[in-house]
Image: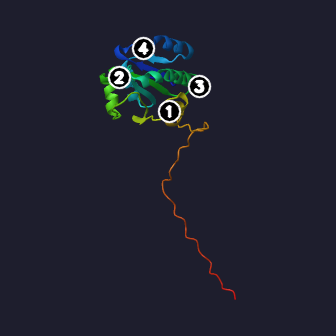
Amino acid sequence: MYNMGIEVVHIDEGNKEIDVKNIEKLIEITDPKVKMDPSEVLKIYNKGTTPMFVEFYANWCGHCKSLAPIWKNLTSTLEKDFKNKDLAMVAVENAVMKNKDIQSVLSAIKLEVRGFPTIGLIKNKKFTEYNGGRDEKSMLAFIKKQAWGIMEGGKRRKSIKRRKSIKRRKPVKRRKTVKRR
């Protein structure tokens, strides 16, 4: 069972972390749970209650390389400022996407990764693609809105309750008007 908090899941080919030094620094500062096994992603997905902000990347992709430091800064910001929120930050390298556990998640959310990086949020077993700016502020705003329902200004979106039945209003009786001469 997962505790509430920010989980960092970074999977690459051979299930080894690419930049171990930065993750070790991140662990010292924020103490996130770092999991590098593809089955962990499937477990988080199957649980269904933890939103996952996912990045599918390729080592050879220039856009992915420029996104890497932003992703790490976003992870540390989330861990520092949103400790009480539930979220899994998942980065999956393209070679690992052939893994059966990752494939089962991709097929369940009906996602076909056609370009890198592909970024989005999986919540309630549905994928919402992120098409915003490649900066920390834009991604943080997306996560706050899509994962936790927090709108700009820091207010939480109120859920709208529908009435069980619609009451019809009684017709208004009109007074007869008297013509004056």
| Mark in the foreground, 3 or 4 | 4
The answer to whether residue 83 shows anywhere in this view is: no
Please name the residue that numbered disc 3 is placed on. 81
Q: Residue furthest front?
A: 62
What's the distance in space between the residues labelled 3 and 4, CA to CA?
A: 25 Å
The amino acid marked with disc number 4 is: Ile
The reply to whether the C-beta atoms of the residues labelled 3 and 4 are less than 8 Å apart is: no
Question: Closest to the observer: 16 or 85?
Answer: 16
Q: Position of residue 30 (x, y in %)?
A: 55, 17
Give whichever of discs 4 and 2 has the lower sequence position: 4
Determine the image quadrant of residue 175: bottom right
Please name the residue that numbered disc 4 is placed on. 18
The reply to whether the C-beta atoms of the residues labelled 4 and 1 are less than 8 Å apart is: no
What's the distance in space between the residues labelled 4 and 1, CA to CA?
A: 24 Å
Q: Residue at x 53, y 28 (%)?
A: 136
The amino acid marked with disc number 1 is: Gly
